[in-house]
Image: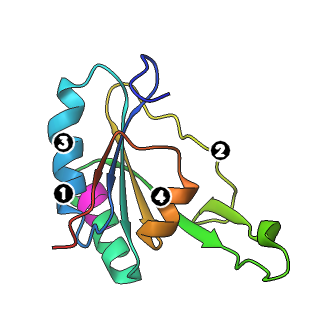
């Protein structure tokens, strides 16, 4: 759970744009953190997600996992009909928590509405919600 030894420190950048904040957090917090670090950078714009992944992987040498959040609309007659899943870019379903390498940070770049992702993902210990 949150704050538990052996579980990743999970940080969320809800409006990632270029991914600059997520990259900075990954580079500065991981060396000081005793737990694995997972930084989730989310944006609804596909071009922003491409840029965030490029910044993290190619320009800063971080491990990156690209994800997409899919939300099926609820049927008005059945409130439980809504389905939600987080999938890798290749379409494979993800476990609720990704194990990251204890020696460094994992940056997850998710092309999704941040509001939906908050409901789909495991809890975050810190969420940056400033859109500017």
The crowd level at tag 1 (other Cα within 10 Å; few <14, some 14-19, many 20+) is some
- Nearest the viewer among 59 and 69 is 69
Q: Quadrant of residue 42?
A: bottom left
Q: Give the image location of residue 128, x and y in percent.
A: 25, 56
Q: Nearer the viewer, mark 3 or mark 2?
A: 2
Assign a secondary structure to mark 2: loop
**Which residue is label 3 attached to?**
27
The crowd level at tag 4 (other Cα within 10 Å; few <14, some 14-19, many 20+) is some
**Which residue is label 4 attached to?**
118
- Earlier in the chain: of badge 3 and badge 2, it is 3
Q: Residue furthest right?
A: 77
Main SS of the magenta segment?
helix
Point 43% across, 30% down: residue: 2
- Earlier in the chain: of badge 3 and badge 1, it is 1
Assign a secondary structure to mark 3: helix
Whole-angstrom CA distance, mark 2 to mark 1, is 25 Å
Whole-angstrom CA distance, mark 2 to mark 4, is 16 Å
The crowd level at tag 2 (other Cα within 10 Å; few <14, some 14-19, many 20+) is few
Point 47% across, 43% down: residue: 123
**In this picture, which residue range is highlighted in magenta?**
54-58
- Earlier in the chain: of badge 2 and badge 4, it is 2
- Earlier in the chain: of badge 1 and badge 4, it is 1
Assign a secondary structure to mark 1: helix
Count up the numbered dots. 4
**Which residue is label 2 attached to?**
95
Q: Give the image location of residue 45, x and y in percent.
A: 38, 82
Q: Nearer the viewer, mark 3 or mark 1?
A: 1
Q: Give the image location of residue 8, x and y in percent.
A: 42, 31
């Amino acid at each position: 759970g949150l704050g538990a030894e052996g579980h990743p420190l999970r940080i969320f950048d809800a409006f990632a744009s270029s991914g600059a904040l997520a990259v900075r957090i990954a580079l500065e917090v991981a060396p000081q953190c005793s737990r694995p670090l997972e930084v989730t950078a989310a944006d609804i714009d596909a071009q922003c997600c491409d840029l965030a992944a490029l910044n993290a992987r190619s320009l800063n040498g971080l491990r990156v996992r690209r994800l997409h959040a899919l939300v099926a609309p609820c049927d008005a007659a059945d409130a439980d009909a809504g389905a939600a899943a987080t999938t890798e870019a290749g379409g494979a379903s993800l476990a609720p928590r990704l194990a990251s390498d204890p020696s460094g940070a994992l940056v997850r770049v998710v092309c999704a509405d941040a509001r939906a992702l908050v409901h789909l993902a495991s809890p975050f210990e810190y969420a940056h919600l400033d859109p500017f």
